[in-house]
Image (cartoon, helix red, strand yellow):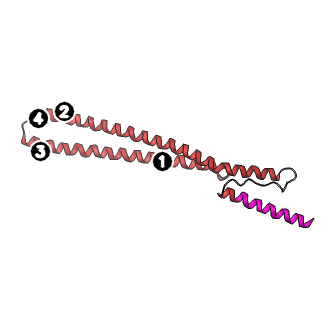
Amino acid sequence: MLTFLKNLSIKAKIFWFVVPSTIAFGVVLTGLALFFLQDFKVQSLEQFEQALATQQQAAVDTSAGNGALLGALHDNADRMIRTTATTFIAIVCGVIVLAAIGALFIAGLIAAPVRGAAEGLANISSGDADLTQRLPVTSTDETGRVSHYFNLFLEKLGAMIKDLQ
């Protein structure tokens, strides 16, 4: 298993780290939102029931009207939870899609210079090991520095070979 992970490309490593963590974030965020909405519903209904109890003590029998009012409030609270849940799910899905696109883009930016350096090294080492070839230095990041220092190494090696001849 460790060898499999070690042999994955940089692009795959980044992608398979970012996407699952973003999905986990979305699931936790949605779960929390639904929990708080449900708690809001329960608290609102309790407060309304208390208000109705106070009203009942002061008024005549209105239990049929109160039951209908409680049912309407319950339905409204359920509708609000569904609407909010749908909104949260849409937002989380959007974040997941954007994170996946971003991860692929960034992974591509990282992998391209590494791939170029690997191809350059393969060209230098193939055939008669032409030490006059150089790796292209297209950036100042880690890959660019590796290419730069490898080119310096080849220059010094070439100078040493000339001195020996």
Q: Which residue is mark 3?
A: 54
Between the residue at mark 2 and the residue at mark 4, the CA separation in whole angstroms equals: 10 Å
The kind of residue on which mark 3 rests is: Thr
SS for callout 1: helix
Q: Earlier in the sequence, mark 3 or mark 2?
A: 3
Q: What residue is shown at x 23% (from left), y 42% (from top)?
A: 45
Please state which of the two labelled residues, at mark 1 or mark 4, is closer to the viewer. Answer: 1
Between the residue at mark 3 and the residue at mark 2, the CA separation in whole angstroms equals: 17 Å
Residue 30 left/right relative to 55: right
Q: Earlier in the sequence, mark 1 or mark 4?
A: 1
Q: Which residue is mark 1?
A: 24
The kind of residue on which mark 2 rests is: Ala
Magenta span includes 24: no
Q: Is residue 8 visible?
A: no
Magenta residues span: 146-165
Magenta span includes 164: yes
Q: Which residue is mark 2?
A: 68
Q: Quick one: which residue is furthest to the right in this view?
A: 165
The kind of residue on which mark 1 rests is: Ala
Between the residue at mark 1 and the residue at mark 2, the CA separation in whole angstroms equals: 41 Å
- Please tell me how crowded label 2 is: few (under 14), some (14-19), or many (20+) other residues with Cα within 10 Å: few
